[in-house]
Amino acid sequence: MPRYAQIVMGPAGSGKSTYCSTMKKHYATLKKNVHVVNLDPAAEVFDYEVMADIRDLISLEDAMEDDSLKFGPNGGLVFCMEYFSQNFDWLDEAIDDIDDDYILFDCPGQIELYTHIPVMRQLVDHLQAQNFRVCGIFIIDSQFMTEASKFVSGIMTALSAMVNLEIAHVNVMSKLDLLNKEAKKEIEKYLEPDLPALVANDLADDPRLNAKFKNLSHAIAGMIEDYSLVKFHPLDLSDEDTFSDLQLTIDNAIQYGEDAEPKESKVKKNLHLQSDLN
Ligand SMILES: Nc1nc2c(ncn2[C@@H]2O[C@H](COP(=O)(O)OP(=O)(O)OP(=O)(O)O)[C@@H](O)[C@H]2O)c(=O)[nH]1
Ligand SMILES: [Mg+2]
């Protein structure tokens, strides 16, 4: 049987842990047991039950307090993740005996982990070797999506993660519930954007910008358009439909559920038993 995983990535504070907790609860309403593994060595609290916690292997404090290492917070985190990549057997043990595996990996927010350092790619390769079908989830905070040039830089990081990992990839725009009605309408053009038009519109009349910056933005927008990847799925904590849409998109991308036997509920089973007896 295949196993399933989501690698939940995105900049610091974009909503990765909230996503994991929300989706775990959402899958539970569908009677699907989804587990969460914390991969953030600096995490302090999370409101979901963890199946495994990287801090049992190594924590940021360990790396920073060690007299011979003397790391600061960022170097310490990179050290922890490299240590993790050399100790995947810890992970294997922690996730070994689960029947219907579907695991969300809640990752740290340092963007270099997805763009420069090979640990996430090594994790994906390791999971795939164990029959996991893996989907990358890249979360971006909608609060930053107010200008086309900020949007372009957000997409560039998402693209960079996607190109590095070479797995099914779903972009999520979080915190839509914090936007007012007007801003929600405005954000729609960022969900499935015509990027070159968006950039052209936004930059055209801005006197602060010089021609070189505008030309560069146009060139990048054209390049991103060529990947035809620029789609974001909304996540609004006040709207359950957004969880369902997201879950269907992701499950489809990794073909979750296609090999599963339909499970009869206890009530239905009892009804069958009763009719057999009659
Ligand atoms: N209203 C609202 N708040 C959110 C949402 N997602 C996250 N938050 C809040 O934003 C803050 C950061 O969310 P986290 O889920 O911890 O973000 P993260 O990406 O895991 O952060 P790091 O692990 O530190 O990189 C918390 O205060 C959350 O409650 C959302 O969709 N709506
Ligand atoms: Mg987090």
Image (cartoon, rainbow, N blue to C red):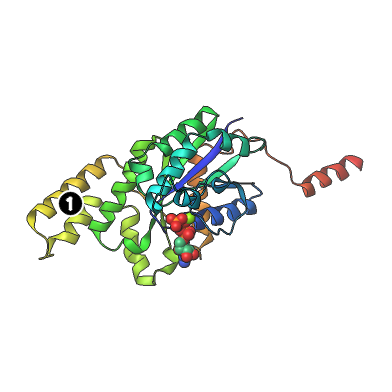
Q: Position of residue 26 (x, y in %)?
A: 58, 54
Q: Please give the name of the residue rendered at 47% of the width and 48% of the height, measured from the top-left corner.
A: 66
Q: Nearer the viewer, residue 246 or 215?
A: 215
Farthest residue in the front direction? 67
User: Compared with residue 230, is residue 149 higher up or lower down, i.e. above or below?
Assistant: below
Toward the top, the furthest residue is 129
Query: Looking at the picture, which amino acid does disc 1 mark?
Result: Ser
State how many labels appear.
1
Answer few, some or many: residues within 10 Å of disc 1's Cα (few below 14, many 20 plus, some between 14 and 19): many
Which quarter shows the N terminus? top right
| Location of the C terminus (image quadrant) | top right
Q: Which residue shows up at 64% across the image and 54% down it?
A: 29
Q: Does the rendering let one see residue 249?
A: yes
Whole-percent x, y for residue 110 in the image: 38, 50
Secondary structure beneath dot 1 equals: helix
In this orientation, does residue 236 appear?
no
Quadrant location of residue 206? bottom left
Residue drawn where x is 32% and y is 65% of the image: 186
Q: Please give left or right for residue 99 compared with residue 113 in the image.
A: right
Front-lying residue, 224 or 115: 115
Residue 28 point in image, percent of width and height: 64, 52
Name the side, left or right, on which 131 lies relative to 125.
right
Residue at position x 80%, y 44% in the image: 269
Q: Position of residue 217 (x, y in %)?
A: 17, 51
Quadrant of the rendered image containing residue 182: bottom left
The residue that mark 1 highlights is: 217
Residue lying furthest right: 278
Left-right relation of 236 to 231: right
Q: Is residue 2 left or right of residue 206?
A: right
